Amino acid sequence: MLWGKANDRGHVMVALDYFRQNELNRGQRKYLNCPEAYVFRQGSNARADLIDPRTGKYHCEDLPVGQVWTYDYEYNYLGGRGNLRLGDGTFVGPVNLIQYQYPGETLNLPPIAGCGDYSCFQAPSGWFPTGYSPASHAVQNDFNPFAGRQTIIPRTERYTLYADAAYHLTDDIEAYGEFLGNRRKTAQHGYRQFWTFGFTSSGSYYGGNGSYWAPGWTGLNFLSPTAVTDHGVDASQRVDYTRTLGGFRGDLGGFMRGWKFDAHVQYSHNKGIYRQEQILKDAIDASSFQTASCVGQTLPVSGKQCQDLPWVDPNFLMGKLTPAQIAYLFDTETGKTIYNQLSAEASINGNLFDLPAGPVAMAIGVDARRDSIVDTPGAITLAGNAWGASSGGITAGKEVTTEAFGEIGIPIFRDRPFFKNLSINADARWTNVKATRRSDGFSETTKGNWTYKLGANWAVNNTLQFRGTYGTSFRAPALFEEFKADETGFIGARAIDPCVNYAFNLSQGNIDQRIADNCAAAGIPGNYGGGSITATTHSSGGIGNLRPETSKAWTASVILTPRIAALPRTSVSLAVDYFNIKVKGEISQLGAANIVFGCYDSPNFPTDPLCSLFTRGGPEITDQRAITNIYDKYINISSQTNTGVDFTLRVAQNLGRWGSLTLLGNATRQLKDKKQVLPTSPVDDFNGTIGDPKFVANLNATWKPRGGWSVFWGAEIYGSASNEQRFKDRHGGSLCQSSIIWGDYCVRLKVPTTVYHNASITKDFGPANAQTELTFGVRNIFDTKPPRVSTIGGGGLPTLIGPVVGTSQYDFLGRQFFLNVSKKF
């Protein structure tokens, strides 16, 4: 809703906007329910997926539920061959997944066999091992009861108020102001796992007193019951943003008449309140290797009264918690982030003098800006009591930026043969940034950062035009990148460790020889089982170590606007733009998996800088080979390069009594998207990978017959893409792997060209000053779904949501009908 009023001295305008979008969750889209493995036998279209005997359909490779992991003490620490034996005599180890045979399941699974040895593993009746050969027996309970709650598109509500006003104080000077206020509320839901560790009832053999919560579980094993829940993950946010600007603009007058000035001050305030449900660490810790009841004790951080939890109860593992257990294990915290910015800018622009081709124009100015951040996490995070989540401190600091800038435009030729117009322009900016961390007053200043741009425009005639630019840019580290307080989190250690079972993986072509050689050089045996379930990630800001990002970019363009004599009522224009952008020192976090894999895949192992960013072993664990800590600070990566060509074609046809037809096409052909993490790292080209297609386009057609009608059709096109080469690079040059569960299988990681069709029809009613406009349309007419790829196989897979690609190009809402009505009063 918009209102405005104006007279010969000024104007005022106010706009109000309200937006609401309900949540789209995974359970609302049937095709997201079952993430099948979607793998194939080599050289054929025969699926290699497991068949779930409970349904007769392909098995869902979702988050396993109702499980207990066993860690074979005899195998890992005493040098034995493994102590879990099936009824057919097969030994299974060293890390096993045991799941419950729920009522109604009629799986013909070999039992766990006793072997007459004190060390042999035994589970109570109803439990069976999974994750072993033959594949027909390796069926996990993956029908997650909470998967349908996972948020795909969050619930969003947004309120916006905008106003601007201006008033001429004199004929030459105008005062003006703007105000923007916005409130955004969002919420997300999901599910997660949580687990603990403990002895079996035979725990006295290795120093324990036997498990308190696992009667009937025997053998030389540690246990790790792993439950699933829809608690400890829900989150909501409220962000309030205000921006106020006031200033003066006009003509300088006097001997500088014709020169314009603009001076303004702006203040913005951004306050974010975020709520997060957490699992309490001290509640989980109370169960770790528990040997006696904890009832009557008080938890050390949360202050709650300790409860004994039924960790091996199948109902508990499936997330069927009592209200008392929910109140004990979970709590909600509230954090707050405040950004403030105060800035002032003044500039003048005008013509210096005249040349035969026109006036030489110039603009100069200065600005100063102060940005600050204070991020205060919730009480649970500050106390380090958020289990399986980040713990961190208060992030606080400020940046003061001062700049001076100038621009000049020079006309060279005008209305001459082969030079209908030739002009050049140049601009430059000087930037100085001082960053100060609030906690200790540490400051860092970057001075004298010059950036510039040169451009030229040459119109040969009315049909042919060339233009080009070359420029540099500069970006100081953002507030959060500089000042982020030390933060810890957790990640699955086995999932990111390329040295797990590397001898087997090398024999099956799952990794290349260099990774295997580097793992062996680190003293890790070829049959290493992983050793730990999680590693701790450490993240923090980079003040004192980060340098600004810089870039160089150049563009070259050709514009054609031919007149076609045979089509006198047709206008055609075509623009072809080449771009080449190279960024140095891009500020980023590498991610834990990239750090570890990059180290072991490096020809410079173990001196590659990535190898210094993680550790194995430590006093907190028994297995000194296990990855324990990964240090993922904000750093400057070496370089990133992006090149491509943009195409824009517009054809407008006057159809006479049938109105007009306009065709518009925009397309981009990306040629390179390369990134090099460190100067010693290989260059990685992402061009054409899933989420980064080589070709994208929009094609639109608009027909406007007479009578206020308009008919629109459009197509959004996202080109084919593939992660298969990236997968090969991480798996010994092959798309095919071997697994004790799936046998020999090959992944498919290609997506076809995807096209979304949209159409609408519009009718205008009434005179222009009181017009009503009615539009009815359909988006994604054919209800095109995101493409499928393989969901198993390890490194090289794209981002997934359930069984489909989860990158931003693809539509999860599906076919949408809309009706828009607008009215002018």
Image (cartoon, helix red, strand yellow):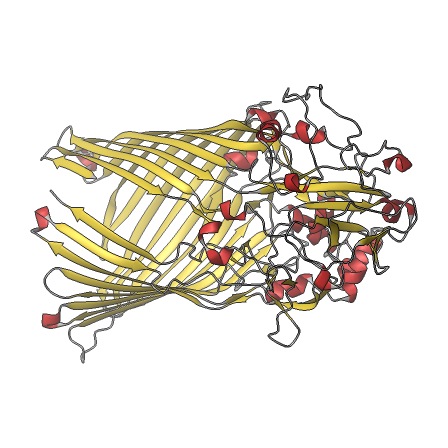
Left or right: residue 516 versus residue 687 is: right
From the viewer's perspective, tell me whether residue 195 is left or right of residue 478. right
Decide if residue 401 is on the left or right side of residue 619. Answer: left
Residue 725, image x, y percentages: 61, 66
Is 435 located above or below residue 259 in the figure?
above
Residue 356 or residue 553, whichever sits in front: 553
Determine which quarter of the picture holds residue 239.
Answer: top left
Can you say which quadrant of the picture contains the C terminus? Answer: top left
Which quadrant is home to the N terminus? top left
Q: Nearer the viewer, residue 545 or 411?
A: 545
Left or right: where 259 falls relative to 597: left
- Looking at the image, residue 521 lies above or below residue 629: below
Q: Position of residue 15 (x, y in %)?
A: 23, 37
Which quadrant holds residue 753?
Answer: bottom left
Residue in the image at 60% along x and 64% along y: 56
Q: Residue furthest left?
A: 767
The answer to whether any part of residue 632 appears in the image is no
- Residue drawn at (62%, 62%), measured in percent from left and top? 726
